[in-house]
Image (tube, rainbow, N blue to C red):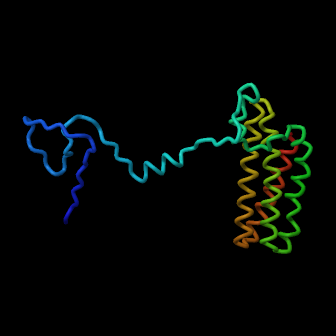
Amino acid sequence: MATTAHQLTCSCSPKLNENSPQKTKLQSQCQHTHTHTHITRRKLFLLISSPIPILSQPVHAAESPNSFLDMFRMTVPDQTVEEAESGIREHAMSLVQVKPLLESESWKDAQKELRKSSSFLKQDIYTIIQGKPGPERAPLRVLYSKLFNDVTGLDYAARDKDVPRVWKLYQDIVVTLDDILSKV
C-alpha cells in the first residue's frame, strides 16, 4: 500500500541552522519556530455555516432588549395572549373538522387541512403557555406535547391509510383538546 507524503513549505525566508540534523521529507523545510494553519474543507464549512445573525438594521438595546431572541420565537411576533385565547377555539374547531375528510377517506386533503389548522393552533397554545405563570405551564406543556404528537401520528396514519389508527388518534386529539380548552 503506497502512501503519499505531503510536505509543508513556508513562504518565509529560511534561516539555516547548521547545527540541526538534516530534515526528512515529512518535516517542514522551515528552520524557525511558528505554526502552520491547515484549513480543511470541514473547518471551512463549519466556519461559513456558523450561526451569525444577519440583520438589515442595527438593533439598539434601548429599542428592544429581546429583539435578537424574538427572531427565534415560535409565537406570532405581535400576537398577545388575549388574541391567542380568542383564536384558540376557532383553530381547535378547524382541527376537529377534518372528520368529514377522514370519513370520506380523502387522505391527501385531510393531511393538508390537518397541517394547516394544527399550525395555527400550535401558535395559539404556545403563546398561551408562555403567558401562564411557571407552575401552570408544566401540565399544559404535557398536553401540548401529547396533542401534537397525536396530530403527527394522525398525519402518518392518514398517509398510510391505516383506518383503525386514524380513528384512535382522532379520538385522542378530541379528548386532549377538551382538556386543553378547559385549562386555558
Q: Nearer the viewer, residue 4 or 177?
A: 4
Residue 155 sits above or below residue 77 on the image: below
Q: Residue furthest front?
A: 13
Q: Position of residue 87 (x, y in %)?
A: 90, 47
Residue found 79% across the figure and 47% down from its top: 123
Residue found 72% across the figure and 38% down from its top: 70
Q: Is residue 146 left or right of residue 89?
A: left
Q: Position of residue 37 (x, y in %)?
A: 34, 43
Q: Which quarter of the image is occupied by the C terminus? A: top right
Q: Nearer the viewer, residue 79 or 149?
A: 79
Q: Position of residue 11 (x, y in %)?
A: 28, 44
Residue 92 sits above or below residue 56 on the image: below
Q: Nearer the viewer, residue 178 or 70?
A: 70
Q: Position of residue 29 (x, y in %)?
A: 19, 45
Image-quadrant location for residue 181: top right
Residue found 81% across the figure and 59% down from its top: 116
